[in-house]
Image (cartoon, rainbow, N blue to C red):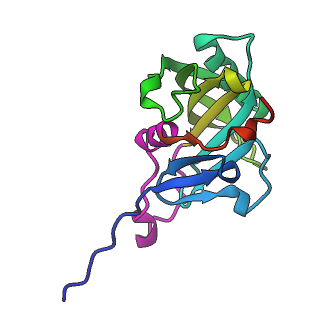
């Protein structure tokens, strides 16, 4: 019998987020960072097993003072400030079609932003240009801005490209889009009394 070749890792479908209040399709090889260290209650943080890539899902207070494209820019600049970015640059902001979202019934508007933030990793002085993709799903019924972030830093030349790592390629923009479009709300009580 011929040896079977290893199958590429499949995405994880219906992965529970926020204690099962949401679920989404995660890209192959996603690690839940809360299994390794404390994560704020309003965040789910997933990291790639090999690269420095990460995906963050955040439940934030609705920023009603900014609308449309400006809301996406506001959150991008806010995240840059929280991360201590030395520079932020927005490359594009586009509306996201609501009919493509599993959350379309409660999402009033959605935006996708791509840009760069110059940030240094913890305990490092050298800042790197990190490509950042964000999707902002606005849920005014729940007074919530749902922010999904894909941090895609430049490849680290020190990474070992041994056989184990070759089976798990870096995440793509398509993996992020699948996370965004598959995000499903199961329990609106996550937002508190309405």
Residue 86 visible from this viewpoint? no
* Residue situated furthest front in the rendering: 194
* Vertical relation: 97 (above or below) 19: above
Q: Position of residue 161 (x, y in %)?
A: 45, 64
* Vertical relation: 38 (above or below) 165: above
Counting labels gives: 0
Residue 78 visible from this viewpoint? yes
At 69% from the left and 18% from the top, the residue drawn is 74
> The N terminus is located in which quarter?
bottom left
Q: Position of residue 73 (x, y in %)?
A: 63, 18
Q: Is residue 170 left or right of residue 54?
A: left
Q: Name the residue nearer the viewer: 125 or 150.
A: 150
Q: Name the residue nearer the viewer: 33 or 189.
A: 189
Residue 62 occupies quadrant: top right
At 44% from the left and 56% from the top, the residue drawn is 11
Q: Name the residue nearer the viewer: 44 or 105.
A: 105
Residue 105 magenta: no
* Vertical relation: 141 (above or below) 59: above
Q: Is residue 103 left or right of residue 1?
A: right
* Vertical relation: 56 (above or below) 159: above
Q: Position of residue 168 (x, y in %)?
A: 43, 61
Residue 191 occupies quadrant: top right
Residue 178 occupies quadrant: top left
Residue 172 magenta: yes
* Residue situated furthest left in the rendering: 1
At 53% from the left and 27% from the top, the residue drawn is 105
> The C terminus is located in which quarter?
top right
Q: Position of residue 70 (x, y in %)?
A: 63, 12
At 75% from the left and 10% from the top, the residue drawn is 65
Magenta stretch bounds: 154-181
């Amino acid at each position: 019998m011929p040896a079977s070749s290893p199958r590429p890792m499949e995405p994880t479908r219906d992965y529970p987020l926020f204690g099962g209040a949401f679920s989404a399709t995660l890209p192959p090889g996603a690690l839940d960072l809360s299994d390794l260290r404390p994560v704020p209650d309003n965040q789910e943080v997933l990291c790639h097993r090999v690269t420095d890539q990460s995906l963050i899902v955040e439940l934030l207070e609705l920023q009603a003072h900014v609308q449309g494209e400006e809301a996406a820019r506001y959150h991008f600049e806010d995240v840059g400030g929280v991360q201590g970015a030395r520079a932020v640059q927005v490359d594009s902001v586009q509306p996201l079609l609501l009919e493509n979202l599993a959350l379309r019934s409660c999402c009033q508007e959605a935006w996708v932003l791509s840009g760069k933030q110059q940030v240094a990793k913890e305990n490092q002085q050298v800042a790197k240009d990190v490509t950042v993709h964000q999707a902002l799903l606005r849920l005014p019924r729940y007074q919530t801005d749902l922010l999904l972030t894909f941090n895609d830093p430049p490849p680290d030349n020190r990474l070992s490209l041994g056989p184990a790592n070759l089976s798990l390629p870096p995440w793509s923009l398509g993996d992020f889009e699948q996370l965004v479009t598959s995000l499903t709300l199961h329990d609106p009580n996550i937002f508190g009394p309405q």
